[in-house]
Every structure is written in C-alpha cells, then in structure tokens.
Amino acid sequence: MTARGFSILELVIVLSIVGIMAAIAVPRYGRAVDRSRVEQAAARVAHDLRQASDRARAMSAPYHAVFSTTKDYYRLAEGVYTKTGLLDRQSVVLLSQDPYLTRIIKVGFGAGDNVGVTFDGYGRPDNAGLIYLRAGNHYRLVTLDASGGTSISIPGVNPAPDPKPDPISL
C-alpha cells in the first residue's frame, strides 16, 4: 500500500517558493499603488484647473485656485476677495487624504513663489505655473499654460527636497 499525501520536504519547498514570490510581488505592488495615487492626484489637479478656467468664462467672473504645500491641499473659489479675505464660494481638495495620499512638493505661478492663480472672466490665468506632486518615490508635474491649458508629465529630476514624511501607505 502506497502512502498518499505530501512529505514535509515537499511542503517546505512549496512554501519557500511562495514566500520568495511574495517577497518579490509586495514591493512592486506598493510602488504600483504609489504611482496610481500620484497619477490620480495629478489628473484631479489638471481637471480642476481646466474646470476653474471654464467656470470663470461661464460666469464672466474671477475664479481662484490656491495651493498649500504645508498642508497638501488646494482651494478653489469664485468671486472677488472681500476685506476679510473671504470669497463667495469655496471648495477644498485634500490631496493628503484618501484616495490620493499625495504631497504637494512645490508650486510656482508667474515670477517668484506665487502659490495661486486667478482666472479672469475670459477663463485666462493671470500666470502660467507648475505644480509638483509626489507619492512614495513617484513624481508628477502639472503644468498650466498661459491660455489655461494643462498637461501632466514625469519630471526628470526631483524638483526639491521634501522634508515632510511619506503619507500613510499600505
């Protein structure tokens, strides 16, 4: 009579192979998740900037986008600034929270370190600009041109050192 089943040696070999495959796959999965997050965040920023231009044109009134590199969010607002600094309507997009978990590394509109852009009643931005985003080791650059068009690219070099810790990851 022959014994059926697996020997302990066969089980150890199979478990070792599965363990090696898992050790290879898990870091790749984490990098893929980071890449997906930064791509989604860049697409959201580009879409919101195009929409701000369209809304300004539709309302024939100013529309603002202001970015915070310290808190990783941006604010979209319509209307004219009042003495208290408040605008008619505002919405905030938090890139540091799910589903993005992305950092805003650097923002620059026009000359200097201007962190905001205003679209006039014709939908034209007052300045062209760049927004650098990062999730893990993946970067994306969102570019706003002088006509209000946007593009997304992968920057060739790290734009600036990021003193902030990585967002929570899997």
Image (cartoon, grey):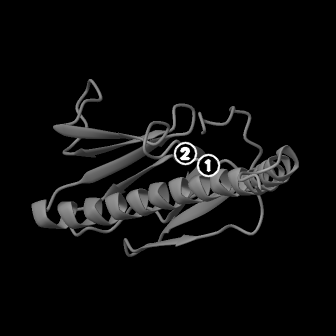
* Residue lying farthest to the left in this orientation: 59
Location of residue 67 with respect to 122 vertically, above or below: above
Residue at the image point whose x is 52% and y is 42% from the top: 101
Instruction: Return the residue at label 2.
Output: 102
Instruction: Return the residue at label 1.
Output: 135
Contact (Cβ within 8 Å) of mark 2 with mark 1: yes
Give the label on residue 35, or none.
none
Residue at the image point whose x is 51% and y is 38% from the top: 72
Asked whether residue 25 appears in the rendered view, the answer is yes
Location of residue 115 with respect to 119 vertically, above or below: above
For residue 39, side relative to residue 62 (left or right)? right
Give the alpha-carbon distance from disc 2 to disc 1, as whole Å: 5 Å
Residue at the image point whose x is 52% and y is 53% from the top: 37
- Amino acid under disc 2: Thr
At mark 2, the secondary structure is loop
At mark 1, the secondary structure is strand
